[in-house]
Amino acid sequence: MDDVGGMQMGEAGLYGRPAVAEVLLRRAFQSWEGLLERLPIGVYVCDRKGVVLHYNSRAVELWGGTPPPAGESPPFERTFHTDGAQMTAEQSPVSVALATGAPVKDREVIIQQLDGRRTHLLANAEPLFDEAGRLIGAINCLQDVTELRQAREMLRNRQAWTQRIVETSPIAIYQTDPEGRVLSYNHAAVTLWGREPKLGEDLWCGSHKLYEPEGAPLPLDRCSMAVALKERRQIAGAEAIFERPDGTRGAFLAYPTPLAGADGEVVGAINMLVDVTERKRAEDLQKTLLDELNHRVKNTLATVQSLAAHSFHDVGDPAGMRQAFEARLMALSGAHNRLAERRWEAADLGDIVAGVLTPFGADVAICEGPSVQLSTRASVTFAMVLHELATNAARHGALSAPLGRLLVHWTRAGDFLFLEWRETDGPPPAQPARRGFGLRFIRGAVERELTGQVEVDFAESGLRCRISAPISATV
């Protein structure tokens, strides 16, 4: 009995009688036994029927610590495909090499250890031939790639995780090649651009049109991404205005970064576009509000000064003068409140009329007209003018009689806004001997603030006041 690799072989040989090839094969592995034991990979040799002839200790470790019984094949009952399905003996790399006579390269298999752990092995099976070219067996090299596979799976998961972050990010992100051709983009970029760029064709950016922050057209080849690639440098916070195909505009801050390969050469670039449209609008609105506040404070102080001068002009009833002055201040404050509710952008004329007449009762007036958004200046002017008319009606006109009624009607016609104030069922108005403060204020405010005109008719049926002003000065 010859002892080959720790396994007893009979003198009859592998196939019932001594064979020169078998003897040569045994001698070869006896001389290489010490070397095989020192290899960091598992190695075993099979005859042409798949019976194991020789193996090293590393192969035993990879099989699970138990060598195959003499004259048998490796433990295929514990061998699986990478998808988890059990592998049959005919599907093993060695069986395939023996059946086809061709090597099987880098075939990944799973071996289940006796403790239940599963080890991923990379198998390379080579068929063995004698000098006459006859197939006599196969050799299989096994390498443990469990940690490598885990690292690869972890990397794949991280890449997928990163991809999900990019796809779900609210910030527009896209990538280009070294020439600036768009290669990929996320959903936020499509939302910002208002279009989907053509991959491999669109250059530098997916925006329909770009503009400088001051409004001048910005060619795409001069955008921040193009500059970053041409000058091979990172750019942080480059501001630009973008225009979508539907004509809407916004602003973004760009952060293009060139990407270098292992050799230091630029292989592309990635860009992040932070949409600051709302922030810019807020800044513009803040500036507008500050400018408007400054303007309104000056105008308000001038108005208060005028109200005070005319309210206390005549020596008479101090309490009445104080009451009139306070009422006018409240009318001015009410107009400012309605403008503040609309962020000082506009106020509806119907709301102004209703706010002035509310203190006099819910059923004293009929108000009708279309929705008209007044400018801040026009809102204050109409509020003060209507207050003077309402105060006069409460003292001398329709609102001083139990059955007195008002009709306030407004409309837009051509380039003008018309408002009519009509009193009915009240005392007949008397033509004043002199123009009082109310009439002087109404005419002055409409002519000065609205570049309009005022017509007053002291008809026997009731006072009528018609105001006309250009739309450009009111809306």
Image: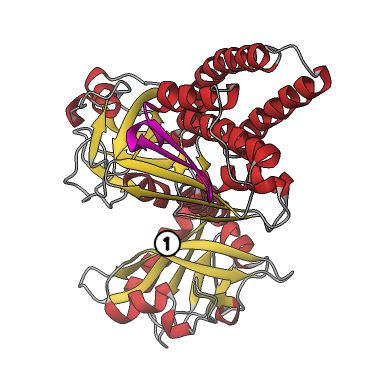
Instruction: Give the farthest residue toward the bottom.
Output: 16
Q: In the visual, does 283 lie left or right of 437?
A: left
* Three-letter amino acid code of the residue under disc 1: Arg
Does 263 sit above or below residue 28?
A: above
Q: Residue 10 appears at what percent x and percent y?
A: 52, 80
The C terminus: image quadrant: top left
- Give whichever of 393, 8 is nearer the camera: 393
- At horizontal 58% and vertical 45% (from top left) the residue drawn is 353
Does 375 sit above or below residue 229?
A: below
Helix, strand or loop for the magenta stretch, by majority: strand
Provide the residue designation for mark 1.
27
The magenta-colored residue range is 451-475
Q: Residue 110 appears at what percent x and percent y?
A: 55, 69
Magenta region includes residue 12: no
- At horizontal 69% and vertical 41% (from top left) the residue drawn is 394
- Give whichever of 22, 307 is nearer the camera: 307
- At horizontal 41% and vertical 74% (from top left) the residue drawn is 94
Q: In the visual, does 72 lie left or right of 100?
A: right
Q: Residue 262 appears at what percent x and percent y?
A: 34, 29
Q: Residue 210 appears at what percent x and percent y?
A: 25, 32
Task: Specify few, some or many for label 1: CA neighbours under 10 Å numbering under 14, 14-19, or 20 or more.
Answer: few
Does 460 sit above or below residue 50?
A: above
Magenta region includes residue 467: yes
